[in-house]
Image: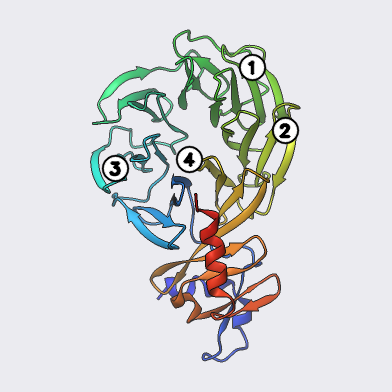
Amino acid sequence: MKKALIVFAFLPALFGRSQTAPVVLDLDQANLSADIRINCARFMSNEQIGWSGYGCSIHVIDMKMLSETKLGDASEPMDMFRVAGDSCTVVATTPGGQFLSWNFCDEKLKYVAGEFIKEYAQTHVISFSPDGRTYFVNGFGCEIKQRSITNGKVMKKLKPIQEECIYMAVCNPVTGQIYCGGNSSVWEAKKGEKSGLLNDELSVINSIAVSPDGKTVAVCGREGIALLDANLKNPRMLVKGEDWWNELIFSPDGKYLYSCSGALDYKNAVTIWDLANEKELISFTDFSGGVNTIDLSPNGRYLLAASLDGSLRIFSTVDQRQVLAAFPVFIGESLEYIFQMANGAVYTSDRMWGIAEIRSKGVVRTKDNNASVIREQINALFRD
């Protein structure tokens, strides 16, 4: 029964009520799902999002049906995962050293491998080559292996350069250049020369992103975000400070850069940068935990953020605002979801409504309080 108490542990409205009275679940309470760690979230398609961190599967939410299915069954909880450009191939890693690949279209496992050392650290980046035939995944900073997307066979090994670990490798979609990131710098794999970044400007490279036209490389680490040209020259700091920046993505038109940040006492946020002026456009800080990953929907309309506070938040890239948040919570042994619209309206399963009333923005909403209307509004967000 331990899991049955998880939802109610943060509900002050429970105290002083009889056991037959409904529980009021307050979405404004911090740490609503603090027991659920969301490591990573990605768009599986324009209408489906997946997340990892609880259990040994990737949880896939159909945003039209508002229902969940599970992909895969690893020997331990998933760490990071990535969906290839074909929207069918999924590659995932676990903290213990396995990596797995599925065909998401038929949900069949393609292969499993485990070649990382036992002291394997958390995966920083899984990235695919522009032609979609291979992918890169890091180990423990010793080397990165470029593998076949078909069978996982090692095609190439990338080694660190002097005084550097190697945490990630990312391909330029236009030129084919391979950029590597380490503990203090970035470099082009073929040349093996450090970029113009100074060691005191960035450390612990967490993400490398390349603009759609292949002309700009964005790099983030513990101390900020830097922009460089395709040859890793002419560096300039987009922002510099003591925030922990985790992941970067360019908008499809290359006009904006999306970033996420947060860890321990650092700023927990999703930020949109205007690259024409190289300035912050807007920052969303409604997180009580670090934001690990961000991802764009295939059609470019939405940005998905995964936070350690146990929330999945979706932002419109058209008008730069949050449009939906999803909170996974436990009801007994069952994992359920609460969906919250930008106006505070909430929707959840009949099972959830049978146990709790939902309060949002000071308004208690019952099962019959516009539930069908709210569901239709959520569905409308994901229509083509």
Q: CA distance from mark 3 to mark 4?
A: 19 Å
Residue 79: image location, x then y, percent: 41, 44
| Label 2 Cα neighbours within 10 Å, binned few <14 / some 14-19 / many ≥20 | few
Is residue 242 toward the left or the right of residue 132 in the image?
Answer: right
Evaluate whether residue 358 shows in this view.
Answer: yes
Which quarter of the image is occupied by the N terminus? bottom left
Q: CA distance from mark 2 to mark 4?
A: 32 Å
Q: CA distance from mark 4 to mark 1?
A: 32 Å
Look at the numbered disc 1 and give the secondary structure of its residue: loop
Q: Which residue matches tag 2?
A: 241
| Label 4 Cα neighbours within 10 Å, binned few <14 / some 14-19 / many ≥20 | some
Identify which residue, 192 or 165, lies in the foreground.
192
| Disc number lying in front (3 or 4) | 4
Residue 365 image-quadrant placement: bottom right
The structure residue drawn at horizontal position 57% and vertical position 25%, both measured from the top left corner, is: 211
| Label 3 Cα neighbours within 10 Å, binned few <14 / some 14-19 / many ≥20 | many
Q: Mark 3 or mark 1: which comes first in sequence?
A: 3
Callout 2 amino acid: Gly
| Disc number lying in front (3 or 2) | 3
Look at the numbered disc 3 and give the secondary structure of its residue: strand
Query: Hey, which residue is sitting farthest front in the picture?
Result: 384
Q: Which residue matches tag 4?
A: 298
Q: Which residue matches tag 1?
A: 197
Residue 334 image-quadrant placement: bottom left
| Disc number lying in front (4 or 1) | 4
Q: CA distance from mark 3 to mark 1?
A: 38 Å
Residue 174: image location, x then y, percent: 49, 18
| Label 1 Cα neighbours within 10 Å, binned few <14 / some 14-19 / many ≥20 | many
Q: Which residue matches tag 3?
A: 102
| Disc number lying in front (2 or 4) | 4
Look at the numbered disc 2 and give the secondary structure of its residue: loop
